[in-house]
Image (spheres, helix red, strand yellow):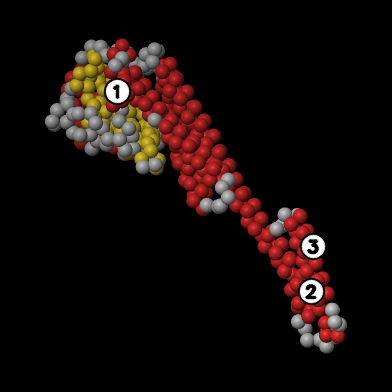
Amino acid sequence: MDMPTTAPTSANVPACVINCAVYRDGVRHDIPLEHISDVLAKDDGSFVWVGLYEPDEHLLDVLQEEFDLHDLSIEDAHNAHQRAKLEVFGNTLFMAVHTAQMVDKHLRFGETHVFYGPRFLLTVRHGASLSFAAARQKLEREPELLKLGPAVALHGVLDFIVDNYEPIVDAFSQELDSLEHAIFAEDFSRGTIQRLYTLRKELTKMRMAVMPMQDILKQLVRIQDFGIPDEVRPYFRDIADHAARTADIIDVQREMAATAMNTNLSLVTINQGEVVKKLAGWAGLLAVPTLVASWYGMNFHNMPELDKTYAYPVLIGIVSVSCILLYRYLKKVNWL
């Protein structure tokens, strides 16, 4: 997974603190953690943005005091096994969203817990999650947007998470294309059905991460308080559209994977039927001489070839002609 690369603001800042800054008039100023409450006490239009990666309980307790966060929201942030949701605690919004990342060609999931207030944004990442440094740097190049407050930063974080779903979905599409060629190959491979099963399982997990994001974004568009400017609401709608489109693609891919599994199994069944038909055809061919030989293998005195000069060659000819006729018929009906 992608580890944070932002340098700490001082030697005493824990490594899990990726970003701690105040944005005043759209310009960034790094601050120590202990100065957060002092900055929030000033009504100067600034806001604080703090980013953490897998912090310990002590650090979260410190930030709870600095931001005046609710006990239940901090308790959720301690645990990285929350369902995706949006909850209101006083004048603070708490969001738990699922992130996804391809690590060594395997899908890994993480969580990001977001605390949003009218003058602050706190993000807590757990597990497989890319750093928000790229989203932060992109916004810092547009100070006019940052002047609108932490709602813009919240949009940047959620947009970054949804955008990172798309490369994973593209990788799934390439995998499906590869499996389609493997399905129609001449030789059956057990690994093909295993890959299809694994792909469908990952698509199902991916859907569980993307679908709740749509509900969260729709609530953000409708919510009235918490200092979300009207100018920012269309941006949340845009992210919701992207999430909906990604969810639709995942649903289509799940159906394609299920269809591919059924097609693969059907082709295997057809191939097995063809093998059985061929075996039955050759067994029918062998049945004719076997039947005749079984009759003449009996120790009766009145055997045609014992007292007739050409009886034995005639019998061989009859058996041969019978086998040839049966072979031609079985060939005609595609049993051989």
The residue drawn where x is 77% and y is 59% is 328
**Please, what secondary structure does the residue beneath circle 1 have?**
helix
Query: What's the residue at 78%, 80% (across, down)?
Result: 296
Q: Amino acid at mark 2?
A: Ile
Of 83 and 208, nearer the camera is: 208
Which three-letter amino acid code belongs to the residue tagged 1?
Arg
Q: In this figure, which residue is indicated by the disc labeled 2? A: 316
Sequence-earlier tag: 1 or 2: 1
Q: Secondary structure at mark 3?
A: helix
Q: Disc 1 vs disc 2: Cβ atoms closer than 8 Å?
A: no
Tell me the quadrant of the picture where the C terminus can be found.
bottom right
**Counting residues from the N terminus, which is met first, the one under dot 3 or under dot 2?**
2
Which residue is found at the position 58% from the left and 42% from the top? 259
Residue 116 visible to an observer of this rendering: no
| Left or right placement of residue 171 versus residue 91 in this view | right
The residue wearing badge 3 is 325
**Alpha carbon separation for disc pair 1 and 2:** 91 Å
